[in-house]
Amino acid sequence: MKFIVLVFCGVLIAFSTATAQVELVTGNCFPAELEFQELQKITSEESFANPERLSKVEDGRLFSDVGFEKYAKRVYSTGDSASLSIEVVTLLDSRAAYSTLTLLRESNLHDGPPGDFFVKSPAGLQFSQGRVWVRIKGNGASEDLVRRVAISVSNRLGPRQSKPPALVAHMPKLGYDSSTLRYYPGTKAFEDYSGIVGGATLRLSSDMEIAQARYSNDNRTGTLSLLSFPTAEVAEEYFSGLTGHEPSQKAGNKTYLKRAGPIVALLVGSFDPGTADKILSPIQFSYSIRWVYEKNRPKTIWGIPGSILSTVVKSLFFVLLLGGLSIIVGIGIALFRFMVRKRSVSSPDHPDKNEMTRLEMR
């Protein structure tokens, strides 16, 4: 009994320890104490979820525009007056984190690790992972230390996704300059950080995603904007408004439009019609249809839903099986008792063999 109690207590302690470890990793993505010898001590630390405090944070306005949830920052001393800071911003979704990375980057995007996507700069490193955006700055810290810390933070954030927003995948490849890609999950961020397309002011809708990049071909350049709407009908209405009223633009630039489903493409630049057609023609959109209703619709047999009939049949089967097993067990017990009794009667030591019954009659 004591052994069983000890085993139960050991399992309970192990489960509690494992749970505590999971909470530690997911709840705090900063490096653990003594994980890096170069990080000597924490000089400052802050964490908040109040969006009003973003006004005192670098790029806080962008965090608010894309969808802010939580901010955390920690600064380490690395010796010899050098330091390393880690900012972790939890945003509304993965699109918001990806948008923040494209708008604040200073170089090309790379596939992770660290993170889903990352960019390097002379000041440090940024990456997005899920709905989290991370910026690590090394003031005098080595590039190797910055990368190792980034890998540690990324591992604590959980599994990677490695998928950009679906709208980015529709950017044509001909003449595409990936280093200029900018993605906006909504119009608020676009208004504050761009608002124009190749010198043309873009008419905004209340609910749309925007992806922009520079294009060049045959010594001609321009900017392509992909606008994604909730439905094809909304996109058609917006497209009709653009064709009826072309936006003002710089002299020498031309505007080319195309609609594919809920996506509207707006190409502004010095392209001739032939080049513009080559750039815009790959933009296609197709719907994928799955007959979920037909697949999951319950079948009926003799007017009875298949699930109910299946349950009844299974219940009857198990009842018959249980009854059969009971009969077999009963027969076995009866045969066993019969054999035991037969052996005991045939034994010479049985009471019936050694006793005599005497009757006295008068």
Image (cartoon, grey):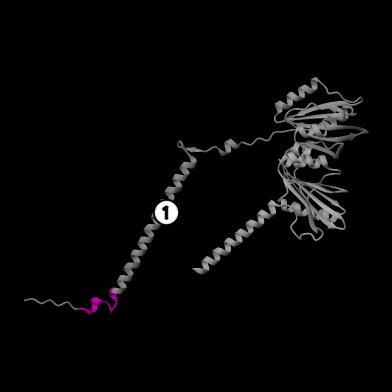
Image: magenta residue range: 345-355
Q: Please tell me which residue lies in front, 201 or 246.
A: 201
- Residue furthest to the left: 362
Is 291 covered by the magenta stretch? no
Q: In which quarter of the image is residue 252?
A: top right
Split into 4 quadrants, where in the image is the C terminus?
A: bottom left
| Numbered disc 1: secondary structure | helix
For image coordinates 81% across by 51% down, the residue present is: 85
Q: Please tell me which residue lies in front, 287 or 125.
A: 125
Is 353 covered by the magenta stretch? yes
Q: In which quarter of the image is residue 223?
A: top right
Answer with left or right where residue 299 lies relative to residue 271.
Answer: left
Q: Please tell me which residue lies in front, 143 or 248.
A: 143
What kind of residue is marked 1? Leu
Q: Position of residue 298 (x, y in %)?
A: 52, 38
Q: Where is residue 148 in the image (x, y as percent from the top left)?
A: 80, 55
Read off the residue under disc 1. 321
Q: Please tell me which residue lies in front, 40 or 179.
A: 40
For image coordinates 83% across by 38% down, the residue present is: 181
For image coordinates 76% across by 33% down, the residue present is: 188
